[in-house]
Amino acid sequence: MFWRSHVAEKAALLYLVVSAAWIVFSDQLVELFFPEDSAALQTGKGIFFVLVMTAGIYLLLRLLVRRRTALEERYAAETIAGQLMDDVLAERELRSMLADLSARLCRTYQLEDIWILQPREDGSLPVIAEGTGKARDLPVDPEPDLTDFVQKALRQGQPVFANAKSSSSRLLHVLPARLSTSKAGSPGLSAAFPLMAGETAVGVLVCFEQDAGQQARRLSEIFEDVARSIAVAWQANEQDRQLLLQDKALSEVANAILIADSAGAILWVNRAFERITGFTRAEVVGQPMHQLRANDSDGQFQERFWRTVLSGKAFKGELLHRHKDGTLISVYQTITPIHAASGSITHLIAIQEDITARKQAEERLMHLARHDLLTGLPNRAAFNEHVDELASSSRANGHSFAVLLLDIAQLGRVNENWGHETGDKVLIETARRLQDNLKVGSFLARYGNDEFVIVHPYETGLNVPMKLAQDLLDAISPVYTFPEAAIHCEASIGIALFPQDARQTGQLLRNAELALRRAEQERGLSYCFFSAEIDAGLRHRTQLREELYSALDRDELQLLYQPQLHLERGEIIGAEALLRWRHPLRGLLAPGAFLDVAEESELIQKIGRRVIEKALQQGAQWEREGRQLRVAINLSFAQFSNPELVDDIEQELRQCGLSPYLLELELTESMLAKDMEQAATMLERLHALGLSIAVDDFGTGYSSLSYLYQYRVDRLKIDRSFVRGIGQDETSSAIAEAVIALGHTLGMKVIAEGVENEAQLHYLNRLGCDEAQGFLISPPLPPGDFTQAALQQFSAPPRQAGMS
C-alpha cells in the first residue's frame, strides 16, 4: 500500500537513500578498485551521479505528468458524463444533449469532430448529433466505407479503429451529396464506439481526427465509458420520454382514471376525474372510493364489488356518482386489481367513462318513444304496457278497472276550417282538461289522432266509471277559445270493463272501440258501455263486409230501374237506378241491409263506381235503341266528397257514349249542407259535364233555402214520407204543396217518390207536380222488363186551374 500512494514522499525518500548510499559507498569502491586514480575519478563520479539522477527525475516527472493527464482526462470524461445525466434529469431533448456532449468531447480531447449515429430498421444511419461540423469536409476515398465501418462496430458490439495509413473515408447513406468535395487538412475517420444498452446498440459514437486512430485508440477506455454513459442516458431519456408520454396520456385521456390501494383508498386521479367529478386531486386522495357513489351505503353493491375484485377479476358496471355541486352523473366503470409477484392485490385501477349525456339521450329517446310529442301524454305503446301490467296485477288481486276510449268528433272539421295548427291547439287543450279531471289512480294516454284513452281502477258497480265519463265529457263541452276562433267540440266515450267484458287487454281495447262506435252512431248518446249485443252486431258487420268483397268479385250487385212518369204527358221519361244485392243465401237485399257497412270502408267507392258504370252503360244502350230515357243515380256522401268523381263520370260517359243530359245525379240535403263551399265547387264541375242534379228526400233533412239559392239544382224530389200522407194528413199535403210551389218558383222540376195509389197520383197532378215514381206506376224492374213498362202510356186526371 505504501508504494501505491504518497508519490512525492516516496520519490524524496528514494533520492535520499540513493544519494546517501552513493556518497558512502562510492568513495570506498573507488579507493578499493582504483587507488592510484581516485582523485581523477571523483569528478567523473559526480558527473555520473548527476546524469543518472537527472534521467531518473525526468522519467519520474514524465510518469507523473502522464498519470496526471490520464486523471484529468478521466475526470473530464466523468464530468461530461455527469453533465449528460443532469441533462437527462432536466428532461432536455435528446438531440440537443448529444450535440452538447459531442462538442465538449471534441474540445476536451482535441478531436476534429464527433458524430453520433442512430441505426434505423431500414439500415440507414442518420446523424443525430455532431461536435464541430468539420467532418462534413471529409474527402471521398474508397476505403474504408463509413457504413461498413459503423456496421462492423454494431455487429461486434466493440470499438473499431481506423487504419492509421488511411485518414479518409467516404460516407455512404449518411452524408448528403454536397459533402463529397475534398479539402486539404480535413479530418479523417478515427474510431467507432457502439453505444450498448445491455445487448442492444442504441447508437454509434464516431470520432474524427487528423492522425486516424491515435487519440481515440489511446483514450479507448475513456471513450468506452463515455459510450456506455451515452447509452445509459439515451435509454433513460427514452424511458423518461415514454413515462412522460404515459403520464401525459393518463392525465389527458378523456376517461377518468384513479389508482387506489388494496383497501380502496384513493392514491391518484387524473385531470379527467377532476373535470368529471368536480373534485380536485387533493380533495379525494386518501378517501375511500365508494364515497363518490350517490348511494355509498348500498351494502349489496359493496359486497358484490369486493367479491369480484378479490377473486382477481375486473369489476364492470354502471354507477351513479354525485358531482361536487350535488348533481348526479352516470359513469361506466371498470376496476381492475393489480397483483404483486406473490399474487396478492396491491392496487386497484379504476377507469370511468362519463355516460351522463348518453344516458340522458337514451332517456329522452325512451320518453319520445313512449310519449306523444304534441300533448306530452303517454302514447299507445306506453298505454299498452301500463294496461298489461294493470291487468296482470288485477288478475292476481281480483281487482277491476275500466278502459274509457274518448274521441273528439269535430277535429277533422277544425283542421279543414282553421288549419292543423288550430287542430293541434284543440288536442293540447283537450289533454289539459282531461288531466285536470282525472281521478286518483287514473292513467291518461293519447291513443290515436283524435282519441284519448283513460284507465281507471274501481271496486264494484258502474257508478265510478259512469261518473268519470260524465266528468270528462263536461270538461270538454266548454267552448275552446283561441285568438283565431271559438270552437265547440263534442266527444263520445266507449267503456269496457275488466274482467267483465274481457280478461285479455287486446280484447278489452277492442270492446272499448266497439262501444265508442256505438256511442258515435247513436244521437244523444255521449258514452256507451260495451255489451254482448254490440259484439254480435260487429261480428255481423264484419262478416257482411267480407261477403261484399266477394259479391263484387262474383258480380252479385245488380241494378233495378224504377220508371219515372211525366204526369202531364203520361209517359215514362226516365228511371232511377236502384242497387240490389242478390245474396246467394239471403236472396235479394235492399241497400239498407249493406250500404252502411260499405260506407265504413273503401267498399263504398268501389260499389259506387260499379253502379255508375252499369247505369251509364244501360242508359247508353237505351239511347242507341232510340229511347231518350233519363237515368238517375243516387250518390253517397263518400262519393260526392271524392275529388275523382267528376273525372270518373266524364271517362265513363266518353267510354259508353251516353249523352250527358240523360244522366241525373241524386244528392241529399245533408250532403249539400255539410260543406257548402266544397259542394258548390263540385256541383259546378258536374254541371259542366252537361248532366242534371236532383235533391233527394227534400224536406227531411237540412232544409234551407240558402243552398237552393246558391246551388244550381235541376229537380226537387218530394220524400215518400210526405207522399204517404197526402189526402189523409193536412201537414203532409201542405208540405207537398209548398215544395212543389217552391220548386216551380226557383225554376226547378219537382218529382214525387213513393206514389202507391191513384188518390196520391191524382192529388199530385192537381198540385202541378211534374213527375212521379212509385209502385203504383211500377216497382223496380230488371233492364229487360223495364223496356215493356216504358212503352205503356199512363193517363192522369186533368189539372185544375190555379193549382199549377
Image (cartoon, helix red, strand yellow):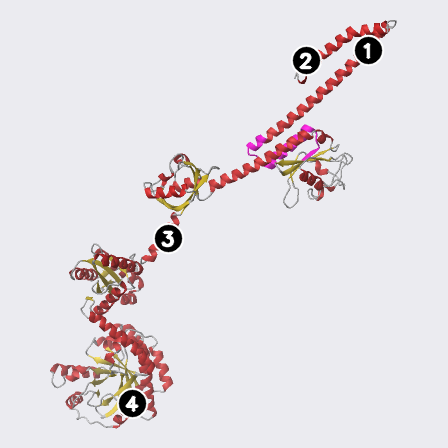
Q: Amino acid at mark 2?
A: Glu
Which of the numbered marks, if any, corresponds to residue 362? 3
- Which residues fall within the magenta stretch? 85-114
* Snapshot quadrant of residue 431: bottom left
**Which x, y percent locates residue 122?**
64, 46
Q: Is residue 93 visible?
A: no
Of circles 1 and 4, the one toward us is 1
* Looking at the image, residue 416 lies above or below residue 33: below
Q: Amino acid at mark 3?
A: Glu
**Which x, y percent locates residue 376?**
30, 56
* Looking at the image, residue 779 lies above or below residue 397: below
Q: Considering only order in the chain, which callout, 4 or 2, is on the residue closer to the N terminus?
A: 2
Tag 4: Cα neighbours inside 10 Å, few (<14), some, or many (≥20)? Answer: some
Q: Nearer the viewer, residue 528 or 67?
A: 67
Q: Considering only order in the chain, which callout, 1 or 3, is on the residue closer to the N terminus?
A: 1
Q: Left or right of 265: which side holds 137? A: right
Residue hosting label 4: 783
Dominant secondary structure (helix, strand or loop) of the stretch shown in magenta: helix
Q: Secondary structure at mark 3?
A: helix
Q: Nearer the viewer, residue 502 or 181?
A: 502
Tag 3: Cα neighbours inside 10 Å, few (<14), some, or many (≥20)? Answer: few
Q: Considering only order in the chain, which callout, 2 or 3, is on the residue closer to the N terminus?
A: 2
Q: Amino acid at mark 1?
A: Ile
Q: Are marks 1 and 4 in contact (CB under 8 Å)?
A: no
Residue hosting label 2: 9
Q: Amino acid at mark 4?
A: Pro
* Looking at the image, residue 301 lies above or below residue 365: above
Q: Left or right of 532: which side holds 548? A: right
Residue hosting label 1: 47
Q: Are marks 2 and 4 in contact (CB under 8 Å)?
A: no
**Which x, y percent locates residue 62?**
73, 20
